[in-house]
Image (cartoon, rainbow, N blue to C red):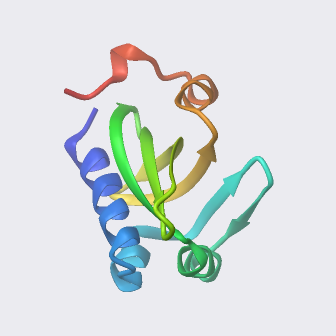
Amino acid sequence: MTTSELATVLAWHDALNAADMDTLLSLSSEDIEIGDAGGAAQGHAALREWAQALDVRIEPGRVYVNDGIVVAEQQTVSVTGETGSEASAFRVVHDHVTSVFRHDTLAAALAATGLGEADLTG
């Protein structure tokens, strides 16, 4: 694990929640891939569109890191106050998020990435 991978993902969440598009884009590769079970999109324009349409605040919880892969358990709070949980898997290269894939559960994200309890950050 490197501190920079973890720091990049935490800063990415902060920028997303603050709607700070300049910082969010600067932390993301130009060809970033954003996806979930419903499909994927690529590039800064797609990231900007996705982030601006987001109607939830996403707070990271437990974080797992290994060799450029970061899985963050996330708590969501919608604009109406509804809460939920999910997880996202990030690929971080040279302090830039190159991909983020949303999973419905932490277990699904860990299974998809091969990370486990040994990769949990302290």
* Outermost residue toward the right in this view: 38
Residue 83: x and y in percent read 48, 50
Left or right: residue 102 versus residue 82 is: right
The image quadrant that residue 77 belongs to is: bottom left
Quadrant where the C terminus lies?
A: top left
Q: Is residue 62 above or below residue 16?
A: above
Q: Is residue 67 above or below residue 97?
A: above
Q: Residue at x 55, y 22 (%)?
A: 114
Judging depth in this view, the residue of 60 and 2 nearest the camera is: 60
Quadrant where the N terminus lies?
A: top left
Judging depth in this view, the residue of 63 and 33 nearest the camera is: 63
The image quadrant that residue 33 belongs to is: bottom right
Q: Residue at x 30, y 56 (%)?
A: 8
Left or right: residue 12 versus residue 39 is: left
Left or right: residue 26 versus residue 81 is: left
Q: Residue at x 48, y 70 (%)?
A: 79
Residue 91: x and y in percent read 49, 47
Q: Residue at x 60, y 78 (%)?
A: 53
* Outermost residue toward the top in this view: 118
Q: Is residue 2 above or below residue 53?
A: above
Residue 13: x and y in percent read 36, 60
